[in-house]
Image (cartoon, rainbow, N blue to C red):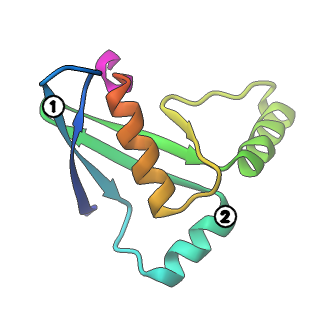
């Protein structure tokens, strides 16, 4: 079971009156220690849910992303990611801010 923690209403276009409500589902309830561990790991998968859809978003910091790309290229000869979001560091604040911004930019409008 996933922990639903954040419910946000964000604008879906500059100057538009329409709003998009969305939720970020964290993988588990996370306290300060858990967030410190996750920030050190440099990645986290979260689910963003909105009326009519939901998407898993892979969140990475730049260092961990580079490590993952290098590893996958060496192992498989390719790197793929579906909903990739890179933030300066994997913190709750950075993830919430970035997801709110990409909702405003219609990131989730294209399946």
Label 1 CA crowd tier, 10 Å (few <14, some 14–19, many 20+): some
Q: Compared to 107, does 2 lie above or below? A: below
Magenta region, main secondary structure: helix
- Asked which quadrant contains residue 100, the reply is top left
Q: Position of residue 45 (x, y in %)?
A: 47, 50
Q: Nearer the viewer, mark 2 or mark 1?
A: 1
Residue drawn at x 33%, y 29% is 104
Q: Quadrant of residue 39?
A: bottom right
Q: Taking 95 as reference, is 26 left or right?
A: left
Is disc 1 placed on a helix, strand or loop?
A: strand
Residue shown at 25% from the left, 58% from the top:
6
Q: Is residue 85 above or below residue 52?
A: below
Which residue is disc 1 drawn over? Answer: 19
Q: Quadrant of the C terminus?
A: top left
Residue 58 highlighted magenta (yes or no): no
Local SS, label 2: helix
Q: Residue furthest front?
A: 15
Q: Which residues are magenta?
A: 107-111
* Residue holding disc 2: 41
Q: Nearer the viewer, residue 78 or 83?
A: 83
């Amino acid at each position: 079971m996933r922990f639903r923690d954040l419910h946000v209403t964000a604008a879906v276009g500059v100057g538009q009156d329409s709003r998009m409500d969305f939720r970020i589902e964290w993988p588990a309830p996370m306290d300060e220690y858990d967030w410190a561990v996750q920030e050190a790991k440099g990645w986290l998968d979260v689910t963003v849910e909105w009326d009519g859809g939901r998407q898993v978003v892979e969140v990475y910091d730049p260092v961990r992303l580079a490590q993952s790309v290098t590893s996958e290229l060496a192992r498989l000869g390719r790197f793929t990611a579906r909903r990739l979001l890179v933030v300066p560091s994997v913190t709750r604040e950075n993830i919430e801010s970035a997801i709110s911004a990409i909702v405003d930019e219609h990131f989730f409008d294209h399946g």
